[in-house]
Image (cartoon, rainbow, N blue to C red):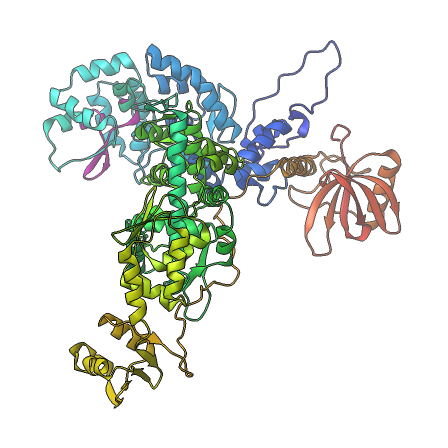
């Protein structure tokens, strides 16, 4: 029988808040203790059921038909594992203590397992103060049921947390004496009993009980251990806190033999012994855990900073983040990297991007994933699939800087993709690639938000010690097993929040606090960002200094005319022959460049820069390249002769067609690149001889939306859904547990009531007569109904009108007025007077 199944006939009279009040002057009867989880849930009021469904939303998919189904689903392994994973450390320790306690367990026994035999001191007092809250959490989540004198842990949770030969207990305790001696020969049990100094008995069960009584009696157990050799105490000390299993040789040492002969160590296999649970608890002083943690560790202020300094530092990081993301996306708008066949970015492309951004590969992966999460980057979906900016990037660039940062930070806070895992290997040994399909980790948004909440709880300008914050997170949601994902997510969150500008010097910024609270952070960030400037400072060493972020037209042109040499509060650009030629290739002329620099420089244009522009412009286009496969023409035949004589031109396949024309086997693009590598400045020309503008148009993907975060389990239902679900469960439970009247004229012992789960069966005439009578008297009836799709259900209805082959009435199961076809009603039964 499933754990949630009711034993015997249960009614809804035990529902708290809905029971009929006894007559005045009479004492309220004490309700009997629940005999199952289903009965315990049935006794809850609607608010308690709502809290359960809110804490465990997986129980709502689909909505249970009644309380019994709810209890059965709450005891399934997947649901229990999910509930255990969401407990704090002390609530989990309480559940672990119940798993090794007697079943059922009285409250004092549970308290002793958590405080120890003495239970004195500050730690014992803290445990006693925190235990009601932890036990209440377990009860609220339907992991524990029963009164304080008979506490029961849900069977599935006990199986998950109790020790076994295949899975050690989190408490480090082994099996009980009864479990460890199961299957042991009666003769061997008698030998152990005799060696322990107990009176002989021929009943193995009595012998095991006597041995258990000895190990749980502190005085007799202490007297027995006083007789043990000193080496035996060392053996016990190695096993007492777990793991409780140890290997032995066929001929063990005398101390081990002494312990084994007296049952202080029991055989688990031919070469393994185990320390019984009762012995370990005596040696531990009754404690189930080596370190009981009833109170969350505090997250104190490690360093204090002025809030203005924190905000200024964070704003600087925010500005750098905007520049980095913009530079990254623009670097992919002409020839973006290819998409791997399995999805994601190749390692060489990640390295190339990191070099272009002048950062590490791990940092580059973070910026790439951030731009992808914000919907600024995507694959184009073509046959030769590449990554490229999306149309949303252009809209993003037009926003004010503070609003651009808000879009990035909001995407980061909600994203489930974790750039920190790039470069690691999955369970199949494959390397995880940036933008790959296997980087989603559903707990990431929750961990990020919780980290920021802990930072927000500190005084303004206070930053915690990272270890203290990680320890607090580990207490609130301890990792079960060997996984350390949440700790790593928290570590990455602290780093990412700093480089993104959500925090400054480890403390939460004012606009970061607004982001966390769901407010628009842009109004708080905007005054902290410098205004874009419309000028640069040209210097004689062929560099230009931008004293702040440049306005967009100026920044775009300067990015073509010069190369970025260094970044920071002031960006330094360097002019080179290659950068000037790049500007000339884009359609600019030398006079255009001189006018542009004179207009936007607060200092005179240095003579070396003017000479550089004129010199490159004078040589630019002197050579002309066209399609023959390709050709080179020049009015200076001596220059063509020089090119032919140069050994570096051998791979281009050049030959002279005329004094001023060379033909080439290479394509025009390869010929241009080859001549430029030789130090020339050729220009491409059209079929009519005009110079071609070589600058490629920026490429955009088709309209793409930002990736949707992967949810961590089912979504938390809203109040409306929870209220409707509770009403449906109550009504379904009423139909499933209602007591039906005996049909008229039927003798006792011949009840027509069907077995649980079966539909009632009555003739069409009996059905019609019963529902008509119910409509006249206003009473409720129980019906079986088969809908048009063939789905059968049981319902409790109060008929209002019966006509035309249909019955209309209030359906208690659906909590609304419905109409049912009479020919689809399989049967009907009246309810006992106290049911509705």
Task: Name the quarter where the C terminus is drawn.
Answer: top right
Residue located at (23% from left, 82% from top): 640
Residue located at (57% from left, 28% from top): 40
Q: Position of residue 390 (x, y in %)?
A: 48, 58
Residue located at (39% from left, 76% from top): 691
* Residue farthest toward the top in the current orientation of the protein: 25
- Residue 151 showing in the rendered view: yes
Q: Position of residue 830 (x, y in %)?
A: 78, 37
Residue located at (22% from left, 20% from top): 196
**Can you say whether 25 is above or below 458 in the image?**
above
Give whichever of 127, 103 is nearer the camera. 127
- Residue 369 showing in the rendered view: no
**Can you say whether 809 is above or below 681 in the image?**
above
Quadrant of residue 437 in the image? Answer: bottom left
Give whichever of 568, 196 is nearer the camera. 568
Give whichever of 25, 597 is nearer the camera. 597
* Residue farthest toward the bottom in the current orientation of the protein: 657
Q: Is residue 375 left or right of residue 317?
A: right
Q: Is residue 466 left or right of residue 153?
A: left
**Can you say whether 307 is above or below 348 in the image?**
above
Q: Position of residue 527 (x, y in %)?
A: 48, 35
Quadrant of residue 594 in the image? Answer: bottom left
The span picked out in magenta is 260-279
Q: Is residue 46 left or right of residue 281?
A: right
Q: Position of residue 411 (x, y in %)?
A: 47, 45
Marks counted in the figure total 0
Quadrant of residue 598 in the image? Answer: bottom left
Q: Is residue 316 left or right of residue 607?
A: right
């Amino acid at each position: 029988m499933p754990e949630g199944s009711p034993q015997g006939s249960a009614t809804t009279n035990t529902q708290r808040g809905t029971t009929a009040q006894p007559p005045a002057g009479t004492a309220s009867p004490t309700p009997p203790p629940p005999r199952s989880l289903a009965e315990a849930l049935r006794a809850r009021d609607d608010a308690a059921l709502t809290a359960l469904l809110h804490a465990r939303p997986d129980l709502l998919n689909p909505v249970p038909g009644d309380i019994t189904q709810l209890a059965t689903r709450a005891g399934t392994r997947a649901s229990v594992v999910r509930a255990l994973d969401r407990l704090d450390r002390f609530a989990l320790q309480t559940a672990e203590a119940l798993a090794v306690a007697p079943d059922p367990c009285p409250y004092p026994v549970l308290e002793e397992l958590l405080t120890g035999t003495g239970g004195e001191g500050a730690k014992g007092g803290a445990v006693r103060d925190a235990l009601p809250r932890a036990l209440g959490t377990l009860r609220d989540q339907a992991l524990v049921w029963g009164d304080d004198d008979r506490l029961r842990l849900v069977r599935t949770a006990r199986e998950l947390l109790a020790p076994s030969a295949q899975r050690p207990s989190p408490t480090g305790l082994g099996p009980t004496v009864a479990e460890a001696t199961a299957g042991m020969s009666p003769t061997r049990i008698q030998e152990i009993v005799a060696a322990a100094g107990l009176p002989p008995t021929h009943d193995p069960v009595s012998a095991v009980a006597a041995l258990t009584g000895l190990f749980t009696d502190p005085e007799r157990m202490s007297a027995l251990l006083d007789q043990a050799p000193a080496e035996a105490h060392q053996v016990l000390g190695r096993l007492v806190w777990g793991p409780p299993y140890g290997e032995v040789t066929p001929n063990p040492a005398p101390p081990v033999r002494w312990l084994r002969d007296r049952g202080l160590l029991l055989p688990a296999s031919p070469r393994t012994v185990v320390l019984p649970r009762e012995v370990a608890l005596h040696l531990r002083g009754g404690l189930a855990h080596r370190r009981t943690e009833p109170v969350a560790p505090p997250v104190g202020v490690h360093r204090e900073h002025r809030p203005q300094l924190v905000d200024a530092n964070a704003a600087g990081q925010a500005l750098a983040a905007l520049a980095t993301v913009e530079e990254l996306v623009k670097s992919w708008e002409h020839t973006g990297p290819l998409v791997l066949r399995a999805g994601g970015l190749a390692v060489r492309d990640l390295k190339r991007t990191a070099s272009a951004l002048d950062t590490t590969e791990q940092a580059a992966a973070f910026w790439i994933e951030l731009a992808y999460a914000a919907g600024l980057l995507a694959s184009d979906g073509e046959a030769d699939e590449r990554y490229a900016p999306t149309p949303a990037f252009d809209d993003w660039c037009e926003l004010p800087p503070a609003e651009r940062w808000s879009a990035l930070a909001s995407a980061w806070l909600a994203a489930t993709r974790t750039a920190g895992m790039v470069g690691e290997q999955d369970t199949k040994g494959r390397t995880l690639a940036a933008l790959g399909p296997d980087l989603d980790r559903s707990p990431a948004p929750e961990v990020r938000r919780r980290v920021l909440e802990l930072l927000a709880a500190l005084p303004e300008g206070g930053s915690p010690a990272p270890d203290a914050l990680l320890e607090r997170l580990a207490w609130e949601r301890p990792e079960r097993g060997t996984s350390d994902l949440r700790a790593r997510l928290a570590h990455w969150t602290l780093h990412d929040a700093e480089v993104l500008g959500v925090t400054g010097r480890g403390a939460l910024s004012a606009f970061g606090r607004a982001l966390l609270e769901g407010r628009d952070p842009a109004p708080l960030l905007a005054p902290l960002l410098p205004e874009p400037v419309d000028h640069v400072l040209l210097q004689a060493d062929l560099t230009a200094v931008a004293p702040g972020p440049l306005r967009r037209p100026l920044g775009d042109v300067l990015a073509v005319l010069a190369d970025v040499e260094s970044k920071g509060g002031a960006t330094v650009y360097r002019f080179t022959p290659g950068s000037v030629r790049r500007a000339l290739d884009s359609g600019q002329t030398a006079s255009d460049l001189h006018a542009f620099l004179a207009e936007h420089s607060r200092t005179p244009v240095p003579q070396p820069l003017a000479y550089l522009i004129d010199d490159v412009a004078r040589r630019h286009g002197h050579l002309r390249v066209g399609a023959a496969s390709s050709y080179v023409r020049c009015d200076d035949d001596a220059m063509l002769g020089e090119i032919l004589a140069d050994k570096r031109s051998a791979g281009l396949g050049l030959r002279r067609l005329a004094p001023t024309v060379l033909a080439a086997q290479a394509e025009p693009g390869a010929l241009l690149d080859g001549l430029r590598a030789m130090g020339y400045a050729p220009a491409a020309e059209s079929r009519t001889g005009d110079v071609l503008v070589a600058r490629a148009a920026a490429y955009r993907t088709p309209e793409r939306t930002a990736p949707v975060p992967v949810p961590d389990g089912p979504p938390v239902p809203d109040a409306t859904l929870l209220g409707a679900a509770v009403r449906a469960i109550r009504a379904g439970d009423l139909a499933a547990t209602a007591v039906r009247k005996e049909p008229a004229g039927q003798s006792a012992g011949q009840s027509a009531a069907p077995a649980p789960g079966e539909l009632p069966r009555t003739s069409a005439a009996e059905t019609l007569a019963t529902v008509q009578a119910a409509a006249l008297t206003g009473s409720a009836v129980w019906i079986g109904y088969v809908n048009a799709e063939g789905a059968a259900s049981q319902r409790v209805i109060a008929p209002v009108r019966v006509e035309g082959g249909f019955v209309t009435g209030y359906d208690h199961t659906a909590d609304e007025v419905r109409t049912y076809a009479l020919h689809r009603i399989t049967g009907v039964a009246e309810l006992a007077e106290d049911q509705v």
